Amino acid sequence: LSYSWPGNVRELRNTIERGCILCPSGKIDAVHLMVPDVSTATVAGVPMENIEALPPMPLAKAERLIIEAAMRRAGGNKNQAAKVLGIHRTTLYKKLEEYNISEKS
């Protein structure tokens, strides 16, 4: 597995620990690490590799779209969505309330 790690060492350690916890078989795969797959990730229907194709938008709208995408990816699980976003769970709860995003978004 070859992947350029975008975060810091602490984030890498946390991701590996999460993979160990989520992996019942003992073999950690990318799905256990919840590493974003740029080839399939989209925001507002636009693949991440073409993110420049998105029209300019206010930061709040972009943040909302990204949070909604993380919630979909996590199947509505707020804890997993917060981990995917790299934010604390309580921060996600505040953002969900601020943008009136439901678990089923």
Image: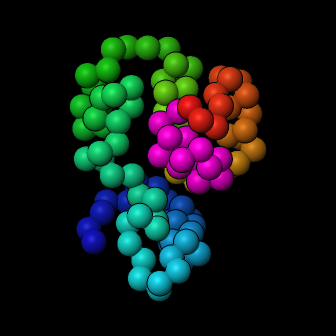
Say which of 25 and 2 sits in front.
Answer: 25
Report whether 71 appears left or right of 79.
left
- The quadrant the N terminus occupies is bottom left
Image quadrant in which you'd find residue 35: bottom left
Q: Please state the horizontal and vertical placement of residue 68, each as a whole percent of the image.
A: 53, 33
Residue 74 is one of the magenta-drawn residues? yes
- In this view, 86 is above or below 27: above
Outermost residue on the bottom side: it is: 26
As drawn, is 79 to the left or to the right of 32? right
Question: Can residue 84 be seen in the rendering of this structure?
Answer: yes
- From this viewpoint, is residue 13 visible? no
Q: Observer-nearest residue: 104 or 34?
A: 104
Quadrant into which the C terminus falls? top right
At a point 33% along the width and 52% down the height, the residue shown is: 37
The region drawn magenta spans 68-82
Colouring method of the image = rainbow
Q: Nearer the viewer, residue 4 or 43?
A: 43
Q: Is residue 46 magenta?
A: no
Using the image, determine if residue 99 lies above or below residue 15: above
What residue lies at 34% left-to-right and 42% top-to-bottom? 41
Q: Is residue 105 left or right of residue 29?
A: right
Q: How far from the left and from the top, in percent, is residue 21?
A: 59, 75
Residue at (55, 26) in percent of width and height: 64
Residue 55, placed above or below residue 11: above
Residue 28 on image: x %, y %: 42, 77
Question: What is the x, y in percent for residue 33?
Answer: 46, 65
**Residue furthest out toward the front:** 104
What type of secondary structure mainly makes up the magenta span?
helix
The residue sitting at 64% across, 37% down in the picture is 103
Decide if residue 36 is on the left or right side of residue 26. Answer: left
